[in-house]
Image (tube, helix red, strand yellow):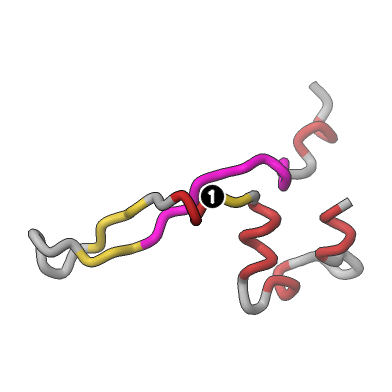
C-alpha cells in the first residue's frame, strides 16, 4: 500500500477511552474504567481537550478535520 494510505488516522471510528478511578483495594493505584459515556471518536476526544488546536499543524483546523 502506498504511504499516503497511512497519512491520517481514522478520526471518525468510535473508540473507548478510559477514566482513571482510585482502586480501594490497592491504595495509590489507579484503576482504568471504561464507561459507556466515554465512547467517542478520536476527533471528538481531540475537540474536547482544552488546547486542542495547539498540536495541529499550521493551517489545519478542527473544522477541516471534521470534513
Q: Residue furthest left?
A: 25
Where is residue 60? Give x, y as percent: 87, 64
Determine the residue positioned at 22% across, 66% down: 22
**Residue in front for this viewpoint, 53 or 7:** 53
State the extent of the magenta-drawn residues as a range: 10-19
Q: Residue furthest front?
A: 36
Residue 30 image-quadrant placement: bottom left
Determine the residue positioned at 32% across, 54% down: 32
**Residue in front for this viewpoint, 20 or 7:** 20
Is 4 situated above or below 57? above
Where is residue 54? Give x, y as percent: 72, 75
**Magenta residues: mostly which secondary structure?**
loop
Where is residue 12? Give x, y as percent: 72, 44
Determine the residue positioned at 61% across, 71% down: 49
**Dot 1: within a 10 Å radius of its alpha carbon, few (fewer than 14), some, or many (20 or more) residues?**
some
Determine the residue positioned at 72% across, 47% down: 11
**Relative horizontal placement of residue 41, taking residue 4 as reference (left or right):** left
Is 1 situated above or below 4? above
**Residue in front for this viewpoint, 56 or 48:** 48
Q: Identify the residue position indicated by label 1 in the image.
A: 39
Amino acid at each position: 500500500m502506498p504511504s499516503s494510505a497511512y497519512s491520517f488516522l481514522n478520526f471518525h471510528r468510535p473508540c473507548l477511552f478510559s477514566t482513571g478511578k482510585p482502586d480501594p483495594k490497592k491504595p495509590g493505584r489507579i484503576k482504568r474504567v471504561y464507561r459507556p459515556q466515554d465512547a467517542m471518536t478520536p476527533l471528538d476526544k481531540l475537540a474536547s481537550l482544552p488546547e486542542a488546536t495547539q498540536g495541529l499543524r499550521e493551517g489545519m483546523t478542527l473544522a477541516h478535520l471534521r470534513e
